[in-house]
Image (cartoon, helix red, strand yellow):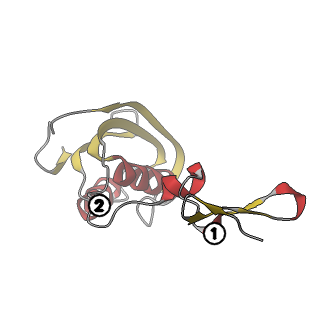
Amino acid sequence: MKKAVAGKMAATPTVGGAVDLRSGNAESPAVYATRVPKGSPKPSILVRSTFRITGKVQHVYFRKFTQQRAVELGIFGEVKNEEDGSVTGVAEGRIEKINELKYWLQFKGSPKSKIDTADFQDEQPCEHRKYSRFEIIK
């Protein structure tokens, strides 16, 4: 049985003490947190992160595929080969897009690459972009 609470339906307790949030109780923090007014801009945090990828990541078009993926995601920054055989870079963009790039760098990479480690450091919010595109540094 549902109870009226200030003109709204209350969450309905179920077996085991769980609460049925489908009742639309706006007072419930779980329900309230998932509702965003229509037309509201998505909150977006601009971040800058550095990365270092090791494994078979040179001579397999890793930088080119990284640039392609970053551009698809709307990420700016740079990527370059290091003398020790690793690939390093800087990526800046919306945090959710940076997380997608991190996943790609860690688990996918270029078709012929073999990723051993993917280290991400210095992830910090930034107010302004330092880069105007995603570049391959030679």
Could you say whether the residue bearing mark 1 is in a helix, strand or loop?
helix
Q: Position of residue 103 (x, y in %)?
A: 48, 54
Please indicate, yes or no, whether residue 12 appears anywhere in the rendered image: yes
50 w.r.t. 39: above or below: above
85 relative position to 20: left or right: left
93 relative position to 11: left or right: left
Between the residue at mark 1 and the residue at mark 2, the CA separation in whole angstroms equals 37 Å
Q: Which residue is mark 1?
A: 23
- The residue sitting at 23% across, 58% down in the picture is 74
Split into 4 quadrants, where in the image is the N terminus?
Answer: bottom right
* Three-letter residue code for mark 1: Ser
84 w.r.t. 21: above or below: above
Please indicate, yes or no, whether residue 80 appears anywhere in the rendered image: no
Sequence-wise first label, 1 or 2: 1
Q: Quadrant of residue 67?
A: bottom left
86 w.r.t. 37: above or below: above
Nearer the camera: disc 1 or disc 2: 1
* Three-letter residue code for mark 2: Leu
Label placed on residue 73: 2
